[in-house]
Amino acid sequence: MIKVVRGNPTPEELAAALAVVQARAAAVAAAPSGAPREPGAWADPARVAMGRLPAPGPRAWGRTYWPG
C-alpha cells in the first residue's frame, strides 16, 4: 500500500510515481536470486587513486578530494 503523506500530487504525478515503483519491483522479481552480485566500478578502491594527487603544501588538505 502506498500512502501520500505530504503534498497534493496530481493524478498524473501519482501515476508516474506508481509506474516507477512497479518497474523497480518487476526488475527485482526478475533478477536471479541465487547468484551473488558483483560490486560495480564505483566500489573499487583503486578508483580513488586514479586522479592526480594534490601538490604538497599547507593547503593540500583542502584539495584532497577536489584537485584543481
Image (cartoon, helix red, strand yellow):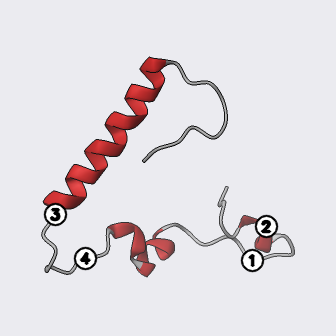
Say which residue label 4 marks.
38
Q: Nearer the viewer, mark 1 or mark 3?
A: 3
In the image, what residue type sits under mark 1?
Pro
Is disc 4 surrounded by few (<14), some (14 to 19) or many (20+) residues within 10 Å? few
Is disc 3 surrounded by few (<14), some (14 to 19) or many (20+) residues within 10 Å? few
In the image, what residue type sits under mark 2?
Gly
Whole-Å distance between the Cαs marked 1 and 3?
48 Å
Could you tell me which secondary element the residue under label 2 belongs to? helix
Say which residue label 1 marks.
56
Could you tell me which secondary element the residue under label 4 belongs to? loop
Whole-Å distance between the Cαs marked 2 and 4?
33 Å
Q: Nearer the viewer, mark 4 or mark 3?
A: 3
Between 36 and 66, the one nearer to me in the picture:
36
Between 54 and 18, the one nearer to me in the picture:
18
Labelled pair 4, 3 in contact (Cβ < 8 Å): no
Is disc 1 surrounded by few (<14), some (14 to 19) or many (20+) residues within 10 Å? few
> Residue 34: which quarter of the image?
bottom left
Residue 13 position (above or below residue 1): above
Whole-Å distance between the Cαs marked 2 and 1?
11 Å
Say which residue label 3 marks.
31
Classify residue 52 as left or right of residue 12: right
Relative image position of residue 30 (x, y in whole percent): 14, 58
Say which residue label 2 marks.
62
Of the 4 image quadrants, the one containing the C terminus is: bottom right
Q: Nearer the viewer, mark 2 or mark 3?
A: 3
Which mark is first along the chain, 3 or 2?
3
Labelled pair 2, 1 in contact (Cβ < 8 Å): no
Which mark is first along the chain, 4 or 2?
4
> Residue 63: which quarter of the image?
bottom right
